[in-house]
Amino acid sequence: MNATTSPRTARPSVVPDLSLVGVTMLWGGTFLTVQTALQWSGAFGFVAMRFGVAGLLALCLCGRMLTRLNRAELRAGIIIGSVLFASYSLQTLGLPHIASSTSAFLTALYVPLVPLMQWGLFRQRPSLAAWGGIAVAFTGLLLLAQVDGSHLQLGMGEWLTLGGAAAIALEICLVGRYAHACDPRRVAVVQLLTVALLSACAMLFSGEALPQAEPLLLLAVLVMGAVTALIQIVMNWAQKTVPATRATIIYAMEPVWAGLVGYVAGELLSVSNVTGAALIVASVLLSQLGGRRQAA
């Protein structure tokens, strides 16, 4: 065997990891955009339009590949899409009630949740570092939520966002579970269209008002739709080679970008908020140290 092709000398590509870093940058900029767009649309309506545009774009790019869509990919796309619907809907419902930077840091709690879900769903026991990360994350949550004495001041926005974080953790576990056996582009098309359909149904059954005909809303929908399509395709592709544990380390950068965007936009953070946010980011990294070493 030629030395250039020997398994001992071959090195894994860093492109998937760098692609996920790009995903976190895109994620970080979406919180403020969505919060602004919700002035003219309800949560379900915006999610339906956002993922409808994303699904159509993905369909245009990958339409020819759908002729080879198999039953396993269809099932994976519907399951992951349903979880995506829950995560984005809960997060979007919570955004009008809290600052975009707070939403980003609370959403980051999905990372310490990933080891717990992997344990419960796939019998992968969390490491000691993961348990330490969970403890640090809870402390950060208390500070971020501004605990008053013995009372935890979590409002509707915080609880909805935490529910969205749990759904995102489940999505990451499922993507890692299905990615190896599925084509990422075909699955992404099914995922995106599933979210759009479920969101449209939720808007109708909840009696939510129709979105307003506002140019800025249309612009936000188009931009977010394109970003969402790109994110899902890249995630599905990158997690074919990047383990869920290492992927979550990279995803920890998301609240950092979001906090920077919120700060530039004029959002104020107290010392308690900053300390709590820093602890959450630290917990994200600490909880994955064991998985990172194993992946290495």
Image: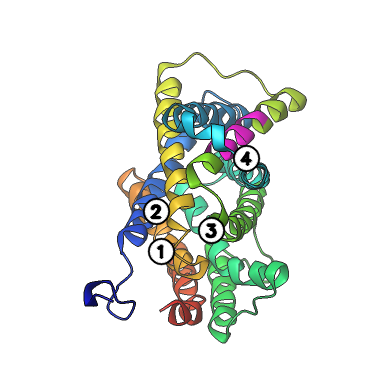
What residue is drawn where x is 50% and y is 13%?
213
Question: How far apart are labels 3 and 4 at the CA level?
Answer: 27 Å
| Marker disc for residue 89 | 4
Helix, strand or loop at label 3? It is helix
**Which residues, given as a range, are shown in magenta?**
189-197
Please check the rendered image and state whether residue 133 is part of the magenta-colored stretch, yes or no.
Answer: no
Which residue is labeled 2 in the image?
A: 24
Which residue is labeled 3 in the image?
A: 180
Q: Amino acid at mark 3?
A: His
Helix, strand or loop at label 4? It is helix
Q: Quadrant of the N terminus?
A: bottom left
Q: Residues within 10 Å of mark 3 (few under 14, many from 20)?
A: some
Instruction: Judge whether residue 180 can be spotted in this image.
Output: yes
Compare marks 3 and 4 and give the one earlier in the sequence: 4
Q: Amino acid at mark 1?
A: Ile
> Tags 2 and 1 in contact by the CB under 8 Å rule?
yes
